[in-house]
Image (cartoon, grey):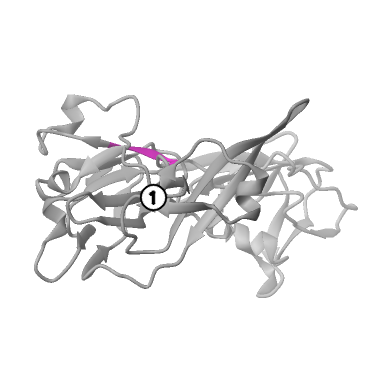
Amino acid sequence: MQPQGGLDLTSSGILTFTQADLIAKRVFYSFRLRPYSPMSDSFLFNVSTPHLTDGPFKCQVHHSSRRRPAGVTLRPLWVTEGSYEYITTTSLSIRINENIKSSTQLSYNVTSPPSHGIIGISADTKRLNLLGLPHSSLDYFTSEDLETGKLFYHHDGTESPKDRIPFVAWSLPSNFIFEGQLDINIKGINNHPPRRVPAASLSVQMVLGGSRRLTRQMLEFTDDDWDSDPSLLKYSSVMMGPGRGASGGGGGASFIGNLYDRTVSLSRPVFSWTQGDIDGGKLVFTHEGPESQGFLSFWVSDSKFTVNGKRK
């Protein structure tokens, strides 16, 4: 890995310096190569006296550069959750000047590994799944890897909408160094069924013949897919005997009541609703049967997975 820079004292690299050196402004930080972008670096140091050593302390170095490469391509890479995509010059390419295509001679150091996937190189772009994945992510690649289509990013399948590959690109012959970041956008897939929120009581109490507004504290399901909208989860009641509604304790044809959308009609029961209807306070449950307690059976669907539930 090519170091970005280091501390110098009278034009030579140093590992130690004194307070007197600092006061005399003899200590300076210099880049090993010419920066063509804002750069950041850091170093750790201890402070020592004849009787005491304190540290480590960290010094952050930030550099602003007006130089820019002749051309930079940094387009976000789109990857399906749990899958992979190849990183090519379509997403990442740097041209140092108008006459030299730096993509043929650049090296890339990955300064921090991706948080939700790995970077790897595959010799066979058509059989990546059969070759197996490396146990750790690459920390170095070249412009040749980009041009030949060997470099890939593989998402780990977690519920993560974004990832990133921060890098430093450099070339010794061209006296060039550039700091950048390739953003990765994850296309979510529906792989989690709806689940009940544990805090929801799944029960409601009311007086005989009365009504009670349904709230999320009583009935709430959610979806663990990061790109899902729980308010769109759809509930549907289950047919019980000759009628619909909540069944009494004895089951069969008896029922204890029905749900109504108070914003539409309090005389026509509803047999399908959404989590958004519950959260918006639209639904009321009205006791209508001879039984004093019972259950409302229902299904919850996210359009792919359907689970059943029962509310007392």
Relative to 65, residue 122 above or below: above
Considering the numbered disc 1 on the image, is that residue within a helix, a strand or a loop?
strand
Q: Is 101 on the left-hand or right-hand side of 54?
A: left
In magenta segment, residue 55: no
In the displayed structure, 177 sits above or below 155; it is below
Q: Is residue 6 above or below residue 132?
A: below
Camera-nearest residue between 112 and 204: 112
Q: Considering the image in quadrants, where does the C terminus appear?
A: top right
Q: Please state if 21 lies on the left or on the right of 184 as rendered.
A: right
Where residue 128 appears, as percent x and y from the top left, is 17, 33
Q: Which quadrant of the structure image shows residue 17?
A: top right
- The answer, for residue 244, to whether it is visible in the render is no
Query: Where residue 239 sits in the image (x, y, percent)?
Result: 55, 46
Q: Residues within 10 Å of mark 1 (few under 14, many from 20)?
A: some
Judge whether 167 appears above or below 72 on screen: above
Main SS category, magenta section: strand
Front residue of this view, candidates 117 and 269:
117
Q: Which residues are magenta?
A: 115-119
- In depth, the one of 212 and 105 nearer the eye is 105
Identity, as a three-letter code, of the amino acid under mark 1 = Pro
The quadrant the N terminus occupies is top left
Left or right of 294: which side holds 193? left
The reply, left or right, for residue 132 in relation to residue 48 is left
Residue 288 percent location from the top left of the image: 78, 55
Residue 180 in view here: yes
For disc 1, the marked residue is 166
Q: How many marks?
A: 1
Residue sitting at x 65%, y 47%? 20
Give the image location of residue 24, x and y in percent: 61, 55
